[in-house]
Image: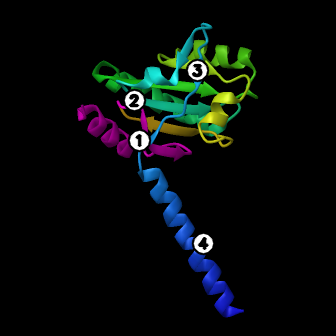
Amino acid sequence: MKKHIVVVSFVAAVALVAGGYAWTQNTEAPVSTFILLDGSQKPSSALQGKVTLVNFWATSCVSCVAEMPNLVSTYEKYKNQGYGTVAVAMAYDPPSYVVNFVQTRKLPFDVAIDNTGAVAKAWGDVRITPTSYLVNKRGEIVKRYVGEPNMPELHRLIEALLKES
């Protein structure tokens, strides 16, 4: 029995390390289309050329609401250097709530409504909010955050990615 527990623990540890390693490798951002609040469409290919944070959130998510001021200040800090943010509201979030949230908080970046769930599905079947992906200028995901990012770490990574050509 003890040997079985050790083997299972070892396999679990290897799986955790492998899973973490998989997310340290840059992978191309999935093909998807963001439907912005104004009705326009932004294909994921439009992320190329900028460092972009794609943030999946909901108005009913306490952590999402709490992190939003940090996402706004991060956007404001780096927007003139080639940084962007796309906040993707989850399919279960009523569009009227999203519009109200964006207007009352004056969100300065792109906000999309994923009313079919297709975008969340394409980006790894996102179900936990907030979940964010940092995408480099080549359109590759370089980091995934589940929960609020460590903001100083995020800023350091953004600054390094902005320096890349």
Q: Looking at the image, is mark 3 or mark 2 earlier in the sequence? A: 3
Look at 64% across and 79% down and name the residue there: 8
Number of marks in the rendered image: 4
| Amino acid on which disc 2 is placed | Thr
What residue would you read off at disc 4?
12
Q: Looking at the image, is mark 1 or mark 3 earlier in the sequence? A: 3
What residue would you read off at disc 2?
74
Q: Quadrant of residue 141?
A: top left
Give the magenta range.
137-165
Q: Secondary structure at mark 3?
A: strand
Determine whether 39 is above or below 130 in the image.
Answer: above
Label of residue 34 in the image = 3
Closer to viewer: mark 4 or mark 2? 4
Q: CA distance from mark 1 to mark 3?
A: 25 Å
What residue would you read off at disc 1?
151
Look at 67% across and 19% down and name the residue there: 98
Q: Secondary structure at mark 4?
A: helix
Q: CA distance from mark 3 to mark 4?
A: 36 Å
Dot 3 alpha-carbon crowd within 10 angstroms: few under 14, some 14 to 19, many 20 or more: many
Determine whether 151 is above or below 139 in the image.
Answer: below
Depth check: 85 or 136 in front? 136
